[in-house]
Image (cartoon, rainbow, N blue to C red):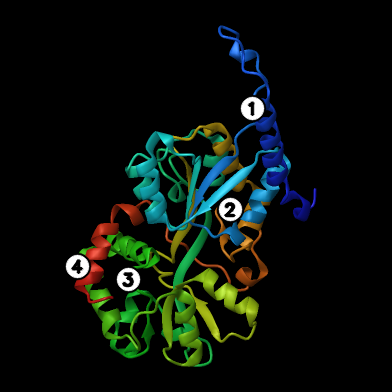
Amino acid sequence: MSHHSSRFAPLALALSAALLLSACSNSEAPAPGADASAEAPAAAAPLVIYSERKAPLLDPILADFTAQTGIAIETRIDGADALIERLAAEGASTPADLLITVDAGNLWQAAERGLLAGVTSPSLDANVPANLRDAQGRWYGVSERARTIMFAKDRVDPSTLSTYEALAEPQWKGKVCLRSSAKVYNQSLVATMIERLGAERTEAVLKGWVDNLAAPPFADDTLLLQAIAAGQCEVGISNTYYLGRLQKEDPAFAVLPFWPNHADAGVHINISGAGVLANSDQPEQAKQLLEWLVSEPVQAKFAGLNFEYPVKPGVPLDPIVEAWGEFKADPVDIAVAGRRQAEAVMLMGKAGWR
């Protein structure tokens, strides 16, 4: 089935379910004492996904899953915080089966609040490296992104770059751009820095970054990268896929990634990830979808839609992503992003990072 026609599979299933329901409602009610189990079974309910990942980056993949399995899917898109609060409020009556977020810290929070069920799956364990999944099987990475140093390729010699920490040094005074400290991506970066450097050293680095700012923190990474290209600053810190989107629009976009900390921890990475909900009515189908998302053919497509990295090792990269070259990834357990999130937010505030 083509991608185009497979998009209509959920609609066809929903229509057939509606027809079946109307047929059931038009039939006579069973006589008192009759065996209710003798009635025709209802059509399978669709799998419901609460997702922070935007529809264009998800729908083509889910349409393929429906085409291959016949399992209809409904998605409800919102921010992770709103989805987590909604799940907590809905409790056992939630219609949702799977939660997808774009940061490990959010998945950790959902797991700590008892919203995610631990699953046992040899294929998930084989395809997702241990540091990119929950030790109890409550959530798994499905794509990976690097949050790295970005520089103006026409104005900055990459040999002058080395580590995240070095951006706090005086040579970068008035040359650094940052995104708002309110964004969970920055909170996760700082959480892993605390794990690696300790709170005191991390706070000193953050103060140095703030002292070196060329402009107030930006609302998003796209604006930050455009500011580097426009000459407003020389360097910044951004997720790689934002650069991928800009390079797709304009192959001559004058910003490149630099892979820091090669002598020690390596580049900070984060995940888009998912977990089966503790109150799912269809946990086996939800697990089946999660396993499918980290299978080899799906990994390349899922990551490629957003210029990300597959979590499954050895899967081919999108050509734009491949052109950035290889890097050493920080092997830290990404659950640290959640565990130290509150501490990270506090330190960012103390450092004056708005």
Residue sitting at 43 percent across and 40 percent down? 138
Expressed as whole percent of the image width and height from the top left, the position of residue 130 reads: 46, 46
Q: Is residue 302 above or below residue 39?
A: below
Q: Nearer the viewer, mark 3 or mark 2?
A: 3
The amino acid on which the numbered mark 4 sits, given as a three-letter code, is: Glu
For label 4, the SS is helix
The tag earlier along the polypeptide, 1 or 4, is 1
For label 3, the SS is loop
The tag earlier along the polypeptide, 3 or 1, is 1
Q: Nearer the viewer, mark 2 or mark 1?
A: 1
The numbered mark at residue 181 is 3
Q: Is residue 14 visible?
A: yes
Q: Is residue 324 visible?
A: no
Expressed as whole percent of the image width and height from the top left, the position of residue 302 reads: 62, 56
Callout 1: few (<14), some (14-19), or many (20+) C-alpha neighbours within 10 Å? Answer: few
Given contact means CB atoms under 8 Å apart, are the residues at marks 2 and 1 in contact?
Answer: no
Q: CA distance from mark 4 to mark 2?
A: 35 Å
Q: Nearer the viewer, mark 3 or mark 1?
A: 1
Mark 2 highlights which residue?
313
Mark 1 highlights which residue?
25
Quarter-of-image position of residue 58: bottom right
Q: Residue furthest top?
A: 33
Residue sitting at 52 percent across and 51 percent down? 76
The amino acid on which the numbered mark 3 sits, given as a three-letter code, is: Ser
The numbered mark at residue 75 is none
Given contact means CB atoms under 8 Å apart, are the residues at marks 1 and 4 in contact?
Answer: no
Given contact means CB atoms under 8 Å apart, are the residues at marks 4 and 2 in contact?
Answer: no
Q: Residue furthest right?
A: 1
Q: Is residue 38 above or below residue 190?
A: above
